[in-house]
Amino acid sequence: MKILLIGEYSRLHNSLKEGLKLLGHDAYIIGDGDHFKKFDVDFSVRPFFFTNYWLTRKFSGFCSKILSIDLMKLERGIRFYLFLPQLRNFDIVQLINSDAIETYPFFSKHLFKKIFSQNKKAILLVCGDETPVIDYLLKNELRYSILTPLLYNPKLKKEFLYSLKYTQKNYRNLFEFVTKNVLKIVTSDLDYKIPMEKMGFQTCLIPNPVNTNKLKFKHLETSEKIIIFLGINTGSSIKKGTVYFEKALEIISKKYPQKVETIITRSIPYNEYIAIYNKAHILLDQVYGYDQGYNALEAMAKGKVVFTGAETEFMNYYKLTDRVCINAIPDVDHLVKELSFLIENPAELIAIGKRARIFIETEHEYIKITQKYIQMWETTF
């Protein structure tokens, strides 16, 4: 088969592409590499003209501030348009989001019309913010969610504009257009499956593919200091509950000055991020999740102990009895208690790291997951 993957936010599509290539299929990714993360893509729509020249950057800033026109959004759309002649005759087109092109909704709709008309099957993957997901989270029916900070403090609205854009009429219309033209909606984990189904959408959950050949397991050594890593994405830190981790680390650093080393980074490219966290024992990911996102899964594949979403729903879905990661919740005392336990019980730290790797190999190994995608594509009409 020939597959076109539109958009890349986490390395999900790259891992899927690697699996597809290994199984003899042709796969290509078009996207902008997700801003500062700079993920690999085959067709780059990354804004160049309005980001790499001083004068055009100034002009872009002026248009954004004074005229409310985002020239980088327009540039992405134009670059995608120029690739259209090469984006035809694919057996499968998979969108990572209804806003996968990241241009203006009216422009996305026009471009998707072209994509849908010149290719065969189209699939929508929901692995992040999406209109029904945000609609449901705004109902505040879950114990907590990425919108919890906003629901408790409406003054934070400015920090949630990216998520809230999906409730605007133009993005809502774009989502509705996309869903009318795709044959199936796929979710990557329970954080999206639960809201989508609560809002009446039938979805197929296929776990995130993780390339376990590239991500080597490393046995945790605890003879020296235990290293705790917190990689902050400034654009999503409030949604991830980073402040709880920062407060917990302050307490832990004072409590165990001779036993612990903490490393904190802010919005660095993916390759730099990975190089830094490789030496860590513990990775702090997010507190508002019910399941693991891609960042957590990659760390778990390496045998790190990850503080992330691992709620009862997750344990039940995968029929787990032993912890493969630590369920992080928005409670500093809880985080300090869990960190303290691991620091004082390094044998358990090592055991969880081993179970984490086994879990990834069992439930997320990229060839297994790629085969699930292929089966879904082939049986979708």
Image: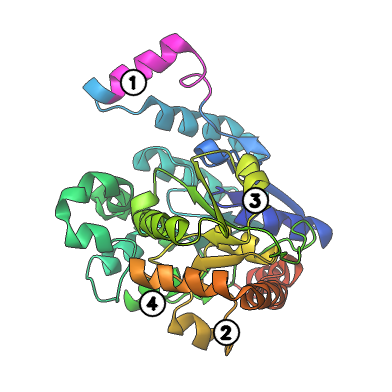
Q: Earlier in the sequence, mark 3 or mark 1?
A: 3
Q: Quadrant of residue 222?
A: bottom right
Give left or right: position of 87 versus 239: right
Q: Earlier in the sequence, mark 2 or mark 1?
A: 1
Please report the bounds of the magenta region as a residue range.
48-64
Q: Provide the secondary structure element on which disc 1 rests.
A: helix
155 vs 232, left or right, is left
Residue 61's tag is 1
Q: Tell me whether the residue at label 3 lies in contact with that at label 1, contact meaning CB atoms closer than 8 angstroms.
A: no
Q: Which residue is tagged 2? A: 318
Disc 3 residue type (three-letter)? Leu
| Res 187 visible | no
- According to the image, label 4 marks what residue? 197
Q: Where is residue 104 in the image (x, y as percent from the top left)?
A: 37, 38
Marks 4 and 3 in Cβ contact (< 8 Å): no
Predominant SS along the magenta part? helix
> Above or below — where is 256 with respect to 352?
above
Where is residue 243, by image quadrant? bottom left
Q: Tell whether 278 sits left or right of 333.
A: right
Q: Quadrant of residue 123?
A: bottom right
Earlier in the chain: of badge 2 and badge 3, it is: 3
Q: Determine the residue positioned at 23% across, 65% down.
A: 138
Determine crowd level at label 4: few under 14, some 14-19, many 20+ residues with C-alpha closer than 10 A: some
Q: Which quadrant, please, contains the C terminus?
A: bottom right
In this rendering, the answer to whether 84 lies above or below 285 is above
Q: Position of residue 65 (x, y in %)?
A: 25, 24
Which of labels 1 and 4 is toward the front? 1
The dot on residue 4 is 3
